[in-house]
Amino acid sequence: MVFRFAILYSLLLTALVLIPSCTTGDLIGHPNLDVWSHAWGMDWFSSQLQSGRFPWYIEGAAWPTERILWYIDPIGATLLTPFSWLLGPIHSYNTLIGIQIFTLGMSMWLLARKLGGSGWLAMSILCTSPVLLGEYWNGVVEAGWLAAIPLAGYLALCSSRWTGVIVGLAAMATPYHGVGAALLVSTLILSDPKLRFAIRLRRLVIIGLVSILVALPHLLLIRASIYSPLSFVNRSIFEGYNHAVLISNAVDPMAFITPGDFWSQTVNDTKMSVPWHKTPYLGWVGIIGSIGALITRKKGMILWITVAIGITLTLGIFLWHNGAWVTTAGGGYYKLPLGYIAQWAPLPIDHPMRFVGVVVCSLAIMADRFMGRWAWVLCGLALFENLHWAPNSWPLPTSDTTIPKVYESIPNDTTAILDLPSDLGVGNRTNRYLFWQRIHGHPVPWGNKVSAIGVASKNPAVIQWASLSRDVSGYIEGLDSNAVITKETLQKENYGWIILHLSLLKNTQELKKYHAISKIYGTPKKYKEQWIWDIRVQNKKSE
């Protein structure tokens, strides 16, 4: 009976998080951020599986080249496959988020009960945590697999042979969750007084080997697809530390405990902004409850070790405070422990804030254990803190998936489309072109980012027109301002259409730049929010 109540409460928490955002039928996630490319990747991966093909070679994007990609979240994309066939790309994507929240709630309930708690408070804290909701706001759905961390801990306490598999799956979801799951499992097993140390150590070795066997193929495929000459992904052009990425993901220590509209990076949510919601906020209900568990020496207080290590990793490579790097007396950056670990990592550690998942999980478990049978009393307070008082991402934003009617005027043929403007220098607003491609079916030139830098083709016309959205056109690698752009420059690669989306321009003055297209391809057909140039070869011959 109690298990049924747990299922019901987990469903209730899932509904609480998602229903305010599901009334429009749009994608959950902010339209200026990563939701478009992740939804595109999910649908592409699922369609390949449905067709009986290995999801490796890209179809529809990166035109006219052949590119490869191993999608970053094969777990989610595989689970989404039957839902995608039944519900389509939009509702199946949102359904996947619901599955993540529900499984997180149940995993937290199981682990909390195993450690002597009731589970209700742990479920409430994690399913609505600002850490989780911030990832959904940003459209980074693979980071939503927090459930793997408490589930691995629960299985470890049950001495299950599946523990290593779940740790490996956590690493497949994101290496940060893999580290978190391994840290939690190690803490629980090494602190088990019922087993001799040699037995504990042997268990950890076996779990580690199994997790590596599970995760290694995925990590090798990721690495191969990133560093291949045929990579679909725009690789970093930086050697060593990418400071732009590090700054974007820097963690101010005050962000762990400061409620309200406090973020490690300033958030300005406007049409042309990049409003990342990145927070390591731990929650005072969890913190105070965990301190109570420590003082009263409750079972599970050993998880404070996990908390301490997790916070150290979450702080990142260099110390950040008050909007700047903290410098040493010599003027250098103050390097943290992760900075020394990162030197030996096989992949870049660009998003250390994601290590905080195991910290929030551990605090919630200890708080639940401290409250015991009275944990349910604080559930409402935890929900209020997470959804109102904490750095807030709820209700979750949505991205309008309505495809412009201009695409309905395009014949169902194999001609490619060049959508403009491309990269605006701020956010990922134009990445919706990738998602639209999954609906209209015509080839497009973009890699994983809609960007003049990342176009697969070196066609000078594609680069020239895509670079118009940049304030400094010379920034675009491969742009030849002296190249002669003729009618045939795009036609030779079977481009049939250029579409300018007026609502995505930075401002009305930007429109003047695009009159250059008319000088070559003639007057466009004008819709309310789009201009479209028909540049098909047969169309020109008929003229």
Image: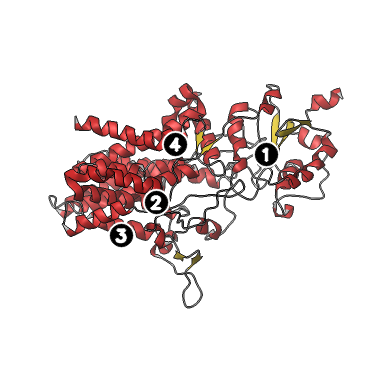
Residue under numbered circle 4: 74
Residue at 28% x, 37% y: name it. Answer: 106
Q: Upstream in the sequence, badge 4 or badge 3?
A: 4
Question: Where does residue 119 sit, x and y in percent of width and height?
Answer: 23, 41
**Label of residue 308 in the image:** 3
**Mark 2 vs mark 3: in front:** 2
Q: Looking at the image, what colour scheme do you see?
A: secondary structure
Q: CA distance from mark 2 to mark 4?
A: 32 Å
Q: Upstream in the sequence, badge 2 or badge 3?
A: 3
Q: Upstream in the sequence, badge 2 or badge 4?
A: 4
Left or right of 342 in this view: 288:
left
> Which residue type carries mark 4?
Pro
- From this view, report whether residue 424 is shown above or below residue 73: below
Left or right of 237 in this view: 22:
left
Q: Upstream in the sequence, badge 1 or badge 2?
A: 2
Q: Quadrant of residue 96?
A: top left
Residue under numbered circle 2: 390
**Residue 299 appearing in the image:** yes
Q: Nearer the viewer, residue 188 or 53?
A: 188
Question: Where does residue 117 sit, x and y in percent of width and height?
Answer: 19, 44
